[in-house]
């Protein structure tokens, strides 16, 4: 067992429109020994109505964004959680991070020790901001300048811009690689394919608990 695993923290981002898929995504972590920190893009009404307790364990700790649901949009909500979550993991003494999402499985979490070999001397092994494994200090450095009103064009565009800014090195890998190594499946994406719809359309019925928004919020891309 790689001794660095004791310094690995897992950050799981989430938002109300993916609640339907949490059971499979979070359930895949059952039995894992790692510290799982989950963020949620809400601070008001629906957060009080969501039965988070049924997902803990394996989730060990929760934190919330600074903004009410839907006010800053999906990708800014993700970046908010990445910024706050990385700092929380740092405060707890972690040195390595695996960033994923609540609607995404990690059935082969036992193989996370193999990720250190895949990483080598680079900062991250990654697939956009959907999956990031690497150095926590580098992760936090990338999130250091972000703020909610920043016009960045998307989570991946912002994060990649900071990788370039600080001359960090990455190993990009696409979906099949992650499926093979970690059993990673984006359950919401598979649901969309199985039902012949765009992923954004799954947000209509992905919201299970709490106050929902009008259909136009999804159409206009504000969430």
Image: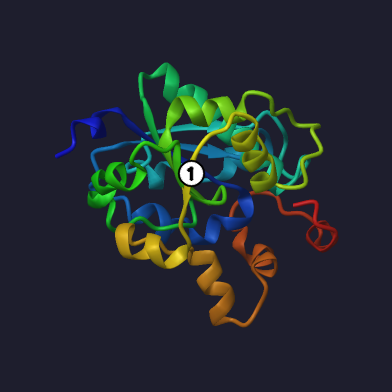
Q: Which residue is mark 1?
A: 170
Residue in the image at 66% along x and 45% along y? 155
Q: Which image quadrant: the N terminus?
A: top left
Residue lying at the far left in this picture: please name it. Answer: 1
Which of these two is toward me, 104 or 147?
147
Place of residue 111 in the rendered image (x, y in percent of width and height, measured from the top left): 25, 51
Describe the element under mark 1 as helix, strand or loop: strand
Residue in the image at 44% along x and 29% along y? 136
Place of residue 188 in the rendered image (x, y in percent of width and height, measured from the top left): 54, 65
Label 1 crowd bin: few (<14), some (14–19), many (20+), radius 10 Å: many
Based on the displayed image, in which of its 4 quarters is residue 124 positioned?
top left
Q: Is residue 115 left or right of residue 157?
A: left
Q: Is residue 200 left or right of residue 137?
A: right
Place of residue 15 in the rendered image (x, y in percent of width and height, measured from the top left): 60, 48
Residue in the image at 35% along x and 19% along y? 93
**20 up-or-down from 119: above or below:** below
Which of these two is toward me, 198 or 152?
152
Place of residue 101 in the rendered image (x, y in percent of width and height, measured from the top left): 50, 49
Based on the displayed image, in which of its 4 quarters is residue 217 positioned?
bottom right
Q: How is the image coloured?
A: rainbow
Q: Is residue 223 left or right of residue 1?
A: right
């Amino acid at each position: 067992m790689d001794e660095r695993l004791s310094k690995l923290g897992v950050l799981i981002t989430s938002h109300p429109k993916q609640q339907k898929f949490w059971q499979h995504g979070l359930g895949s972590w059952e039995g894992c020994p790692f510290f799982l920190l989950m963020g949620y893009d809400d601070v008001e009404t629906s957060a009080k109505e969501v039965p988070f307790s049924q997902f803990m364990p394996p989730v060990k700790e929760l934190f919330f964004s600074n903004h009410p649901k839907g006010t800053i949009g999906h990708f800014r909500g993700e970046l908010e959680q990445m910024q706050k979550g990385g700092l929380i993991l740092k405060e707890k003494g972690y040195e390595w991070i695996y960033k994923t999402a609540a609607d995404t499985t990690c059935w082969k979490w036992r193989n996370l020790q193999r990720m250190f070999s895949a990483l080598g001397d680079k900062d991250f092994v990654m697939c956009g901001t959907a999956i990031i494994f690497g150095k926590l200090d580098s992760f936090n450095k990338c999130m250091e300048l972000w703020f909610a009103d920043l016009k960045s064009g998307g989570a991946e565009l912002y994060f990649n811009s900071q990788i370039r800014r600080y001359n960090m090195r990455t190993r990009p890998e696409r979906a099949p690689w992650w499926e093979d190594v970690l059993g990673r499946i984006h359950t919401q994406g598979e649901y969309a394919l199985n039902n012949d719809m765009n992923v954004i359309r799954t947000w209509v019925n992905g919201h299970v608990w709490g106050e929902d928004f009008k259909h136009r919020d999804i159409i206009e891309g504000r969430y």
